Image (tube, rainbow, N blue to C red):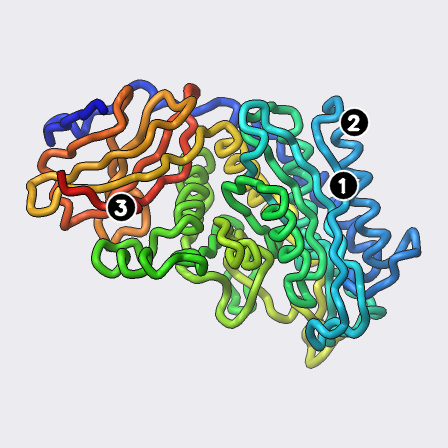
């Protein structure tokens, strides 16, 4: 195993590779269409209600008509790219005994499109939006429930990302998912997470988009720049050994979902600096849930991307005028340009991950009672090099790095292990990098 010693004086140098950005990413940003997103949100609202228990037979109203339209849109996109998408329904029967929001047995049907990777077809990165909607009573399946922002915006964004990214070829597979049953208990996500397990998907991560169209908050704040990225600290599937290790070596805020959130944050700041991504160190909004959670429960990395300033008068509300306030999730309250920006955030993150090599495995750290830090890891197939990252223990982002090639062990001279957190990312031939791997072991020799 080759070792590489980096004197402190050399740590500020960069290679040409580190300074480059990919012009294709800028193309992707510019290709996202506000008008197409507006059209798709308008179409989804036009189905009247998309409640999980609503009509499935009508061609014009209810969740059945909505999911058939979504499937046709994805199939049309696939036709335009020569059949590059595998489009199918993924369904699960949910019994009325599951909870009090399921009043009768119902098939929860997701619409899935897979853009198969050329090099690593079993490595997947997913963007999702929700098909279903609701009013004040979660069991009301008949009243008009436009769900313009919650969550036609996220569903339209997912369709638009498929339109844009289908023009490109990726090393890893990209999944565009329309999930059902979210308002009744996150059933669509639970079903697809189980499907991923059953089919041995190597799922890099899930970017769940739930409400990406509102810019005027109930608190009076108006912003079309801010957005939030929610992520859990560590997977709920961690072992007792991993929990004990965290106590002594850190990692409380360095789980796989948190690394995915940082990846989206960094990609946005690099290619869309006009946007303000906010890392929220919480699984979801206080006391609430979203469709990334079932994937987290299964041990996958998953985050929620959404607007920063919510208006609760437009969420889960009967359409009505009360005390001079218009309630309801209506089309008129959606900022389509903002939804396009957050769609672009997703698309460039999907693309960057789609072109990235696998995340390094078995990253170990050493340097106890030494004036340096040492890291080593297994070689990553297809990696041109690696970025060794470090940051202050109180910093939310990876702030320092060194790029190296042809080695899988490095000593950072003058970087005292006690004062920083460390991680390693693999870098591909075109400069795209994997999410950071936090050390999972310690070595002393």
Residue sitting at x 46%, y 24% = 22
Q: Residue at image x 30%, y 43%? A: 398
197 lies above or below 103: above
Q: Mark 1 — residue?
A: 88
Dot 2 crowding, Cα within 10 Å, few <14, some 14–19, many 20+:
few
Position of 365 relative to 315 (above/below): above
Q: Is residue 45 left or right of residue 149?
A: right
- Res 441 label: 3
Q: Position of residue 366 (x, y in %)?
A: 17, 42
Inspect this view and state whether residue 331 appears.
no
The quadrant in which the C terminus is found is top left
Q: x%, y% of residue 370?
A: 7, 42
Secondary element under disc 2, as helix, strand or loop, is helix
Work out how far the residue at label 2 is from the one at label 1, CA to CA, in angstroms: 14 Å
Q: Earlier in the sequence, mark 2 or mark 3?
A: 2
How busy is the neighbourhood of tag 1: few (under 14 within 10 Å), some, or many (20 plus)?
some
Q: Which percent across, then down, holds residue 97? A: 73, 74
């Amino acid at each position: 195993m080759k070792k590489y010693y980096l004197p402190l004086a050399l740590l500020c140098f960069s290679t040409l590779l580190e300074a480059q950005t990919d012009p294709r990413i800028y193309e992707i940003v510019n290709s996202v269409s506000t008008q197409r997103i507006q059209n798709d949100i308008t179409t989804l609202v036009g189905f009247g209600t998309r409640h999980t228990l609503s009509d499935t037979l009508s061609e014009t109203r209810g969740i059945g008509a909505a999911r058939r339209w979504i499937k046709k849109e994805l199939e049309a996109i696939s036709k335009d790219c020569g059949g590059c998408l595998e489009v199918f329904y993924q369904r699960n029967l949910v019994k009325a005994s599951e909870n009090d929001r399921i009043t009768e047995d119902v098939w929860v049907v997701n619409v899935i499109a897979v853009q198969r990777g050329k090099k690593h077809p079993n490595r997947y990165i997913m963007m999702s939006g929700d098909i279903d909607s609701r009013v004040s009573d979660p069991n009301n399946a008949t009243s008009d429930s436009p769900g313009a922002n919650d969550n036609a915006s996220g569903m339209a964004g997912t369709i638009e990302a498929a339109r844009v990214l289908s023009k490109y070829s990726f090393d890893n597979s990209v999944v565009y998912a329309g999930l059902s049953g979210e308002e009744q208990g996150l059933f669509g996500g639970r079903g697809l997470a189980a499907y991923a397990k059953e089919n041995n998907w190597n799922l890099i991560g899930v970017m769940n988009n739930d409400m990406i169209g509102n810019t005027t908050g109930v608190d009076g704040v108006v912003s079309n720049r801010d957005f939030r990225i929610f992520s859990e600290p560590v997977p709920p599937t961690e072992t007792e050994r991993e929990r004990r290790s965290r106590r002594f070596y850190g990692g409380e805020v360095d789980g796989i979902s948190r690394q995915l959130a940082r990846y989206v944050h960094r990609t946005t700041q690099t290619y869309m600096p006009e946007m303000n991504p906010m890392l929220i160190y919480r699984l979801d909004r206080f006391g609430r849930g979203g469709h990334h959670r079932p994937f987290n429960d299964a041990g996958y990395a998953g985050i929620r991307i959404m607007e920063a300033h919510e208006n609760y008068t437009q969420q889960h509300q009967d359409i009505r005028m009360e005390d001079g306030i218009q309630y309801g999730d209506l089309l008129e309250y959606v900022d389509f340009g903002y939804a396009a920006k957050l769609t672009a955030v997703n698309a460039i993150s999907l693309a960057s991950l789609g072109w990235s090599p696998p995340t390094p495995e078995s990253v170990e750290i050493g340097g106890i009672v030494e004036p340096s830090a040492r890291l080593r890891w297994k070689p990553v197939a297809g990696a041109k090099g690696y970025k060794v990252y470090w940051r202050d223990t109180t910093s939310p982002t990876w702030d320092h790095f060194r790029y190296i090639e042809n080695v899988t062990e490095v000593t950072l001279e003058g970087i005292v292990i006690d004062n920083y957190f460390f991680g390693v990312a693999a870098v591909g031939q075109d400069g795209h990098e994997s999410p950071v791997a936090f050390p999972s072991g310690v070595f002393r020799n």
